Structures are given as structure tokens and as C-alpha cells.
Image (tube, rainbow, N blue to C red):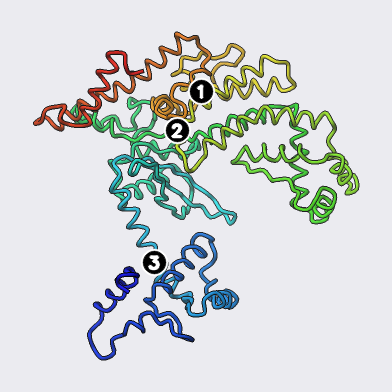
Amino acid sequence: MKRLHPEIYKEYEDQREGKSADANQSSMSDFLSVSEGQFYAAMNPRQKLLTNSLVENLIVKCGLPVSVVDNPYLRKFVRDLDSKFVIPCRQTVSNSILPHLLKTQNETLKKFLDSCEHLALTADIWTDRRAHAFLGITVHAFHDGQPSSKLLAFKAFHGSHTGPRIAETMEAVISDNQLENKVCCVVTDNASNMVKAMSVLFETADEHSLDECSDPTLWEDMETDEVDTVLQNLPVRMSCFVHSLQLVVRGGLSSSVIIRATLAKCSQLANLVHQSALFRGAFEAELGIGKSIPSTNDTRWNSTYKQLESIVKLDHVKLENVLRLSNHENLVMSNKEIQQLRELISILEQFAEATDITQGEKMITVSCIVPTVLLLAKTLNSLLEKPSTFSILTRNLLQGLHDRFYHIFDNLGIPRPTQLAPLDRARLLKFDDSRLLMAPALDPTFAYHWLQDHPGDIEEKQQLQHRINGLFLLLATGLIYMCSKLFFSRPLLSCKPCAMYASMYVMYASGRLV
């Protein structure tokens, strides 16, 4: 047993050493308890494995209620699978197994947070169908050289969703997990209460300048070096790119009068499919079982894109027959309207692709922002050069892109197109962080290839590349200075990070670092 099954043997040894050596002590056969007609003992590895799998996979991950363990049909099914396995009762799951599982997960999360020096957070408020609000906070960091994301908190949020209340809750989460000096960035949507919450949390009334601090006297009693240290460690709020893209597309579609009636028809048709059992039956009988039209979601603009795409792919002769037989002739689309939908889909196609890419969960998406904005602007500019039914929509999309992402175009030295209206600063979002330019240069997927979509000439592109290299050089110089102060008692280049950055500096100065 010890040689072939060391894990089971170790559990047996641990159990035996933990019990008093009396006449009633369990034997090894009692521990395994695999005789015909008997059940697994509580400490049996098989019993523990199945119990944990039942709770983790069915209750936690599948979202089934805890009461499912008392369901007689589930018990019969499990009994047929393994007659020796004893399903725990509801009270045991609620009072023992789930708290132990929560404790284990919290310990794992704490170890992860302790091992990370720099973290980024994302925060959002979500409301379920019963109008119960929850605040979700996730943490993102590099762990052992790999990007890792974990759920930090998911709290019921009662009362009004004001900025100070959101800031208070987030501050408590940061404090409870001892992350005060580790958070470098918080990503939120562009809702005014979230923007206000971040300004309250970071003690600044304006995200762009310290001059408009809500309490200027806060800094009067601090030395200059101390103020610089605080400013360097102050986290920044960054706007969620997907939400910002949502605002661009929604604004463009709402301002397009020519397609408004057709979009209304599509919305009514989708509602009819989902709300009328009689129409749904006729719809599937004519177009095929399982055929449907997805509903839209106000917070996901690409749900509109998917709805339009599914309608265009339908057999419109059969769809027209169903609508006429069910007395819904007002929803029948003409050939012109169908062609308009196809043209609209072709315009929004790249926006939909950009949305899917930049909301990925298993990849780093910050490096996609600048290349995506450049490519969308290039596509829209090329569309404006051709005669089109949707020239006004295209111009409105380009207007929204330049308004929302003004800082990106400004940092890239791209002038505002003359055919656009003056900048509406009320629509301007926060995308002025230099890390947005540095991120794609560090990503092997992009490097500096995204500069091909820059409208400037070769000289302008080279200057931009040198400017971004200068940002890395500035960062490297700062790190060398910090390391030299930290290791002042040692030769500078005996510190491996300093030696690496010093080498980068020499290579850059000699023109070898491109």
C-alpha cells in the first residue's frame, strides 16, 4: 500500500496517528470500507473525492441549489453510479463543506495577492432580473510570468448607487485585502457614479490634474519628495474600452434616421418570435426547428449586430409567408430594406470583431486598444471616400471615435478630419495614459506593425516609434535610479535588473535597440 498507493497510505497514517490508541480504534479495513454492501467511510479518499466533486461542480459551478443533494432522483442516480458513495445532506453542505471550501479559496487568493507587487482592478455594478444589485471587483496581475485574473469580491449593494458609497465599499475591499500600495490601475465603465467613485477613492476631484484637488491643503504639510512619491503611487482610473466602443456605435446608430424604421421592424420581429407561442410555432414550421432571432441587450451593442445578421441570413420568401399568414404584414421587409441591412452589417463588422477581441478573458487586451482605434479610423475614412447610403452614419461613427478617443489620436499626432464637427469635450473619455502606447510595442502580436495604419508619412511614423522607445528609456532610467538608491551600498551593476536596464540604455544610445 505504501509503495503503490502513497497518497491513500498517507491519509491512513494521518488518520491513525490522530486517533487515540484504544481498543475501539478503526482498522485499515474500516478506513477503506469497501466490502460488499457497505458504504465508504467518511475519510475514504473515494468518498471525499466524490463529495468535493458534487459540491464544486454541481452546486458551485453549475449553480444548482444546495437542496439538490436531497432530491431523491439525484440520490437514485448517484446510487446507480456508485452504490457505496454516501451523498451528504443539505445541512452538511451548507454548514460544513461550503464554508470549508470558501476558507480554502480565500487562503489561495491571499497567497496569490501576497505574491504580487502590482495589481490592476476592474469594478462594475450588476443588477439581476429581480432588481438586486451587486458590486463585482476582479483583480489582475502577472503571476509566475503568466497573466492571471481572480474574483476579489462580489457583494450585495443595497441603497442608491452614488459615487461615495461605491468608493466606500471599494476602499473596504482594498483595505481588507491589504492592497493599498499594490493597486496601480482601476478599470471601470464611464458611468458618472463610477467616475465620481474613483475620484473620491483616489482623493482627487479631477482625474487629469492635481490642481483641482478637492482639498488643496492636503499637500501643504508634505515635503516635495513625499508628494512626488504619493503621486507616483496614486492609482489611475482607465475607461473600459468595450464600453467606450459601445457608446461610439450606439451614438452613431441613434443619429441615423435612414435606418431607424428598419431597425424598429427587426426589433419587433425578434420580440414576436420570443413572446408569441403561436407565431413561434409557425416560424419554426416554415423556417426550420431551432431557428430564432436573438434579442438585443442595451448594454451590449453587438447584440444588435447579431440580431441583424441572423435576420439577413433567413430565407426572406418563407419569412414573408409567415408574416402575411399571421397578419403581420407591417413587418415584411422590402428588398431595399434588406440591402440596407447588408450594407449596415458590412460597416459594423469590424466594430463587432473589435468588441469580441477586446473583451477576451484569457488574453491581455490593453495592447489591442491603440491598434484597434487606428484600424477603425482607417476603415471609416476609406468608407467616406465612396458614395454610400450610410455616409452620414459613417461620419457620425468617425466623429464618435475621434470624440471618445481624442487622447489616443492626440498622442499619435493624428489631426482631426476637417469634415468632422468640433470636439465635444462632454463626450471625451480618459485614454491619455502613455501605457496605451507602450503596451502594443511590448506585445509580439503587434510590436510596431500597427503603425502601418497611421495616416502619417514614414518620417512621422519613425518619430512616433522613437518617442515610444523614449518612454521605455525613461522608465528604464527611473528604475536604474531607484535601484541605485536602494542598493547604494553595492556597485550599481551588481544588481541584475540595473545591469539589464543599463545594457538597454547602452544599446539604445548606440542605435542597436530598435
* Residue 100 in view, yes or no: yes
At label 2, the amino acid type is Val
Label pair 3/1, CB-CB below 8 angstroms: no
Residue beneath label 1, please? Answer: 425
List x then y, in percent, for residue 241: 50, 33
Residue beneath label 2, please? Answer: 366
Which mark is first along the chain, 1 or 3?
3
The alpha-carbon separation of the residues under discs 3 and 1 comes to: 50 Å
At label 1, the amino acid type is Arg
Which residue is at the front of the view, 61 or 220?
A: 61
Q: Residues within 10 Å of mark 1 (few under 14, many from 20)?
A: few
User: At numbered mark 3, what does the secondary structure look like: helix, strand or loop?
Assistant: helix
The alpha-carbon separation of the residues under discs 2 and 1 comes to: 24 Å
- On-image quarter of the C terminus: top left
Q: Is residue 50 above or below residue 20?
A: above
Residue beneath label 3, please? Answer: 99
- Mark toward the viewer: 2 or 1: 2
